Amino acid sequence: TYSLCPDALAAKLEDAERKGRLPKVVVPVHFAGQSCDMSRIHALSARYGFRVIEDAAHALGGRYHDAPVGGCRHADITVFSFHPVKSITSGEGGAVLTGDPELYRRVCALRSHGIERDRKLWSSRDEGGWYYEQTDLGYNYRMTDIQAALGLSQLGKLDDFVMERRHLAARYDRLLTDLPLVPPIRHEPDDSARHLYPVRLHGGADARRRAYDALRRAGIATQVHYIPVHRQPYYRARGFRKGDFPVAESYYDGALSLPLFPGLTEVQQDHVVATLGAAL
């Protein structure tokens, strides 16, 4: 699934425990809409004492063990994105979900300048109806009412959007059978939100460049998700080098995401597959 491997995480945690460098937080990313194995990651959090924040930016509308992603059964916090290319959008922004009342209180305060309006939590007496206290150095992360209205209008369509994405992904699976590539791993039942349809081309970086350029010339928008972050200049300047994360680099070399969105027609999908096949 190209997501966090619980076995690899367990080995890293065992090594970190020996060195006295256990993490405070682990952030599993539900890449392309498919949930990580959260029950195993949660068990490791209990064993090693770290908190879990699910990066579910790709997974809104997905399910894990027959429950919606975001229920926080196996995480302290789940984060969703409402960017325009996600399952639903509010124009920008996102949501933080948690079942922990104290974390909820802190997130609410931090999104609005660190302001606390619950008088039971104030350090000083109430000076009047205007009074509040700033308990943290927070931010202005409040969503506007207009954005919220847009998001709510789309929320009721989420299940239909995800079902359409799954239908299109299953159709790609069938159409791409004879091409030299590896399709996304498909689970049964298909509980992924199917945010992306990333394939791995057998020819690696050269094949990816040919396919990308051919699709673009044909007017087909495609993308690569993602360039390994340790290869970016910011991290190279901090000592990371090519070869530090060979699995991520091997995946990246042949990765290409094909168009997948509600409203994509079967005729358009056939054109994508034909153009890709000709390039390979």
Image: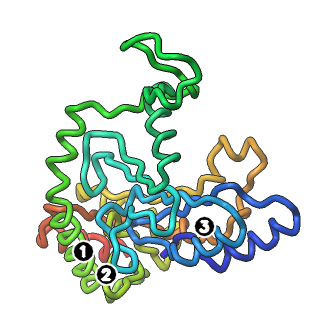
Q: Residues within 10 Å of mark 3 (few under 14, many from 20)?
A: some
Q: Residue at the spot x=70%, y=75% of the render?
A: 10
Q: Residue at the spot x=57%, y=71% of the render?
A: 42
Label 2: which secondary element: loop
Residue 111 percent across, percent down from the top left = 45, 33
Label 1 near label 2: C-beta < 8 Å? yes
Label 3: which secondary element: helix
Colour logic: rainbow
Q: Residue at the spot x=58%, y=57% of the render?
A: 228
Q: Is residue 2 left or right of residue 153?
A: right
Residue named by callout 1: 166
Does residue 217 appear in this view? no
Label 1: which secondary element: helix
Residue named by callout 2: 190
Residue 239 percent across, percent down from the top left = 78, 48
Q: Check the image and name the residue furthest to the right.
A: 19
Residue 51 percent across, percent down from the top left = 61, 59
Q: Residue at the spot x=59%, y=23% of the render?
A: 123
Q: Residues within 10 Å of mark 1 (few under 14, many from 20)?
A: many
At label 3, which amino acid type do we have?
Answer: Ala
Residue named by callout 3: 248
